[in-house]
């Protein structure tokens, strides 16, 4: 475990040198929040109106949190790197290293994501307070619960994207699969909570990645309850185990395929 923590720390320290470059990239986040702020202000004729269980402020905070989770992830960069490693053969060098490639990808990318998450979270909260003038009512336990849920959501997301990238062992290019996944999370999981889906789709969405990587942490932030925290964390832990197993299974099969074909 120490070697993976070292990988995480090294990546984090490296990216600290490029903090300004990261901050410049936050312009798109500000533009996105401004667009959704005006969209929901238009939809809600009255700020105190409740639609599908959400007030206008809750909806805007929901989007702020889901955008923080997605924009701090940098999923396209991760998927592209893994695809290139597989196609170019660079992954063979990692196979001989004293670590597992899946864990290496996870902790290495966490080093990048953690810094971006902290910076975007600060920016998101400032924007929320500036435009809305109030912060969701959260206790210390609630804040800790949201942070835990966000951490699990990020790890699960990285494992899913790693799995997608490793599919390059068996097909020409896995990037189109990431494109489909990213659009699913952005269009369905980020803009609208599950409660806005048609009734027959809500049970499906509840067991999809949307629930654990996007909806869950944001729901806790805008409408916290201990019961909801327990439910979301349990589902996230189950998803964590499943995605970890699938990523390792595909990686092992891919390595076996390389060995059979002579590398």
Image (cartoon, rainbow, N blue to C red):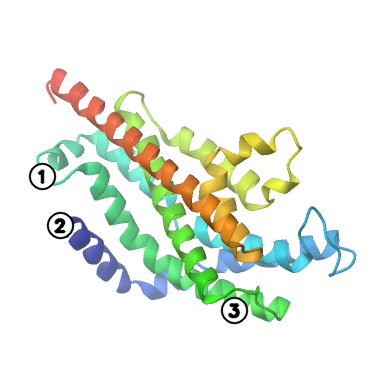
Q: Position of residue 178 (x, y in %)?
A: 47, 38
What secondary structure is found at the residue carrying circle 2?
A: helix
Q: Nearer the viewer, residue 192 or 205?
A: 205
Q: Are marks 2 and 3 in contact (CB under 8 Å)?
A: no
User: Disc 2 designates what residue?
Assistant: 3
Q: Earlier in the sequence, mark 2 or mark 1?
A: 2
Q: Nearer the viewer, residue 22 or 7?
A: 7
Q: Earlier in the sequence, mark 1 or mark 3?
A: 1
Residue 117 falls in which quadrant of the image? bottom left
Q: Position of residue 194 (x, y in %)?
A: 68, 46
Q: Position of residue 219 (x, y in %)?
A: 62, 58
Q: Could you tell whether 172 is left or right of 72 in the image?
A: left
Answer above or below: position of 34 versus 108.
below
Label 1 packing within 10 angstroms: few (<14), some (14-19), many (20+):
few
Q: Residue at x 33, y 55 (%)?
A: 109
Q: Which mark is residue 126?
A: 3
Answer above or below: position of 80 versus 170.
below
Q: Which mark is residue 168?
A: none
User: Disc 1 designates what residue?
Assistant: 97
Answer above or below: position of 164 versus 141.
above
What secondary structure is found at the residue carrying circle 3?
A: helix
Q: Could you tell me how far apart the alpha carbons at marks 2 and 3 are, in whole angstroms?
A: 36 Å
What secondary structure is found at the residue carrying circle 1?
A: loop
- Residue placed farthest to the top in the image? 260
Q: Residue at x 39, y 61 (%)?
A: 113
Q: Earlier in the sequence, mark 2 or mark 3?
A: 2
């Amino acid at each position: 475990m120490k070697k993976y923590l070292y990988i995480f720390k090294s990546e984090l320290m490296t990216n600290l040198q490029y903090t300004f470059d990261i901050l410049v990239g936050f312009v798109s986040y500000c533009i996105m929040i401004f667009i959704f702020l005006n969209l929901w202000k238009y939809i809600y004729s009255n700020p105190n109106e409740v639609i599908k269980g959400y007030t206008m402020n809750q909806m805007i905070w929901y989007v702020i949190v889901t955008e923080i989770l997605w924009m701090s992830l940098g999923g396209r960069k991760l998927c592209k790197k893994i695809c290139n490693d597989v196609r170019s053969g660079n992954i063979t060098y990692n196979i001989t290293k004293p670590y597992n490639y899946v864990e290496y990808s996870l902790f290495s990318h966490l080093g990048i994501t953690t810094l971006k998450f902290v910076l975007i979270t600060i920016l998101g909260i400032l924007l929320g307070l500036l435009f809305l003038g109030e912060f969701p009512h959260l206790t210390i336990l609630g804040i800790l619960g949201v942070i835990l849920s966000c951490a699990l959501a990020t790890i699960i997301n990285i494992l899913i994207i790693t799995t997608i990238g490793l599919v390059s062992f068996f097909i020409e290019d896995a990037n189109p699969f990431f494109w489909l996944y990213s659009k699913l999370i952005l269009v369905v999981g980020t803009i609208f909570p599950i409660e806005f889906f048609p009734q027959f789709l809500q049970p499906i969405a509840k067991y999809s990645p949307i629930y654990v990587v996007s909806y869950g942490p944001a729901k806790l932030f805008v409408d916290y309850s201990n019961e909801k925290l327990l439910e979301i964390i349990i589902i996230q832990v189950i998803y964590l185990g499943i995605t970890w197993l699938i990523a390792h299974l595909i990686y092992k099969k891919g390595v076996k395929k390389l060995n059979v074909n002579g590398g």
